[in-house]
Amino acid sequence: MSRLALDIDPIALIRNIIGGRTPDPVQSCVLAEIGGVESIVCYFRNDLKTINERDLQILREVAKTHFNVRCDISEQSVKKLLKIKPDMVTFVSNNKSSITHPNFVNIDEYFDTLKDYIADLRVNTIANSILIEPEIENVKNAGKLEFDYIEFDVTKYTLAENLDEELAELENINSLSAAANKLGMGVNVSGSINSANLGDISKIHSIEDIIIGQSILDKALAVGFEHAVRDLISLM
């Protein structure tokens, strides 16, 4: 059964824009876990526009569920995360087009570098993952590097323009998730997932974490994090 994962970057972004200490992503993490979230996700950007090092250190102490930190493919980021020791590190593209949702990685471009970083993470008992576009060649390349997990950017599915396109993308995610499992990799998904499409994607049994940020925040502003999380879990 799929698990709901909270992406807390939108909360950190609002805090940083307003200035001060609120809204507090750490407090949101606690409330979301009370509501039933089973994984906390954030993006540790080099420019610190969302989560900062202090946030990471406190979240590492406070989070009771799975703590998954996305980061750029850089020695600086990896070294810092080796000290903080999250449960998982997910590599994302160094090319930034969105503050809160990172871009998928071209594995060919970083193949040798990723191989070294995966080894560093394994020595420190930190699981590894990578954000990729759901295409078979990407899955095969991730398998060659023996990633523990892959994360699919499913934006093509969630933003499909018609039902035929939506169904085709959903079937593609389903088949590629099964292929990843056969290669020994777990599968997480992210990308504009909300209450309208959560039910269908959660039916894919080979998907573990469904990562949602903005749509939980939108609902939480009205009903609170605990209730927002529980309402989404009821759709899974």
Image (cartoon, helix red, strand yellow):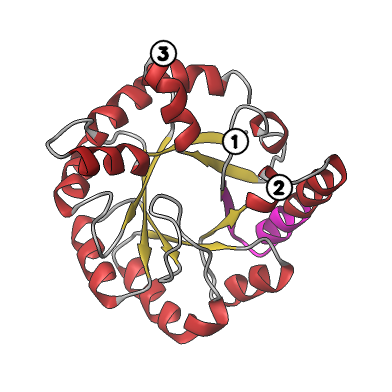
Q: Earlier in the sequence, mark 3 or mark 1?
A: 1
Indicate the position of residue 178 as horizontal and vertical percent values: 73, 54
Q: In what element is the residue under mark 1?
A: loop
Query: Rounded to the nearest whole Å, what is the CA distance between mark 3 and mark 2?
Result: 28 Å
Q: Which residue is mark 3?
A: 223
Q: Residue furthest right?
A: 164
The 10 Å Cα crowd at callout 2, few under 14, some 14 to 19, many 20 or more, is many
Q: Eyeballing the image, is 236 above or below 209?
A: above
Quadrant containing the C terminus is top right
Q: Which residue is mark 1?
A: 2
Report the mark closest to the observer, 1 or 2: 2
Indicate the position of residue 170 as horizontal and vertical percent values: 77, 46
Depth check, front residue: 2 or 19: 19
Depth check, front residue: 25 or 41: 25
Q: In what element is the residue under mark 3?
A: helix
Depth check, front residue: 15 or 124: 15
Q: Which residue is mark 2?
A: 157
Quadrant containing the N terminus is top right
